[in-house]
Amino acid sequence: MKRISVIPIVAIILAVMVLGCDRSVAQTVQESRAASALFGGFETVFYSKSELLSSPHAFKQLSKLEASNLRFPFAYLEGALDSLESPASGAVLANSESILLGAKDFLPPAGLGPVRSQRCYVVVLKNRSAFDLSKYFQTTSVASAAGMPVWTWTAKLGEFGENDQRLSSLHAMQIGQSYVLVANDRKELQLLAGHLASKDRDSHILGEIREWESVSRHEVWGYRRYRHAKIVDPMAAGMADVTSSAEALIFLLNSDKKAGVLRLLASDDSTAEKMNAQMAKAKIEWTPLKPSGRGAWETTIPFSGDEQSADRTFIVVGLFGFPVYL
């Protein structure tokens, strides 16, 4: 009887397991570096797995409007990429693992429309992705960052409000097969690229983010570290009810439970009380923020599929700097 050696089979299985582990670790490292770089330069950081942005049916437990509201911080990126001569958002999402957004300097629109801000998106590419951003540009790059080309273009995205029809200035680059960066400010993009290209810079930042380990395990999350100085318009910035004692605001999506968690970190309850009072005044069905451990207040945001639920998600996204003047 022919004998079959199991050693090579075991070796192959182990090799596959190791490679899979390495890919997972590499992906986590890339995402952590991107988060660290964004936390170093921006007030709000939002994160989503790409698969949740690529399909209208990805948020299975949410209504269409609830999902649309949660995707809203990333809609600007889709519009920017699809304004190219060859729309690129589909290819970018298909070749990416996750997308992170950094935002700051929130300003009101001229008339109706979304609040504008300085934004940088970091697309974390899948391992072994062959994506090539350069093929979506017919012209040569006009600048560089970290030794790599930067492409610039303009698009009508409604960024400045209904009464200001200026075109948006957009900038993009690719860092190897690790990242694609898109921003509406070239200097911010260049700074971000420098952070990402340097493996040793800002490695300490995530250690300063309270509850980071818990936050980073979610498929969708938002984290805002409040800046209390130089606020041009508190309403546009989503800070009308935020007092000086507030440190940070966190949103975590638990789609399998049809709920999200909103968590406020602060040294006293003044912001929580003002937020609760404002929700009651606006007649929004809102479970009040309540104490949840030392220096923290928390509420659960249920996704019930009705109009009130859509209103809640709309308001939550606005608290992170993405409200819309209607």
Image (tube, helix red, strand yellow):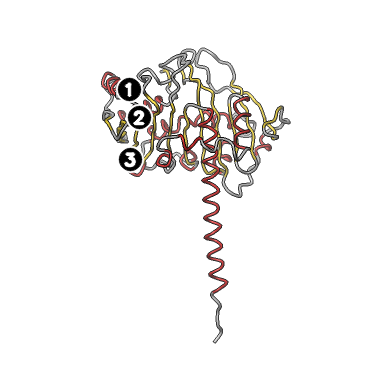
Q: Which residue is mark 1?
A: 271
User: 48 or 144: which is nearer to us?
Assistant: 144
Q: Position of residue 44 (x, y in %)?
A: 47, 28
Question: Circles 1 and 3: CB distance less than 8 Å?
Answer: no
Residue 23 position, x and y percent, is 55, 52
Residue 177: image location, x then y, percent: 63, 44
Query: Is residue 108 visible in the rendered structure shown here?
Result: no
Q: What is the CA distance from the residue labelled 1 to the residue labelled 2?
A: 8 Å
161 left or right, relative to 152: left
Type of the residue with mark 3: Lys
Residue picked out by circle 2: 264
Q: Residues within 10 Å of mark 1 (few under 14, many from 20)?
A: many
* Circle 1: element type: helix
Q: Quadrant of the N terminus?
A: bottom right
Q: Which residue is mark 3?
A: 258
| Location of residue 311 by image quarter | top left
Q: Nearer the viewer, mark 3 or mark 2?
A: 2
274 relative position to 70: left or right: left
Position in image of residue 63 (x %, y %): 36, 36
Asked if labels 2 and 1 touch by Cβ distance under 8 angstroms, the answer is: yes
Q: Which amino acid, mark 2?
A: Leu
- In the foreground, 2 or 13: 13
Type of amino acid under label 1: Thr
Q: Secondary structure at mark 2?
A: strand
Is the C terminus in the top left, top right, bottom left or bottom right quadrant? top left
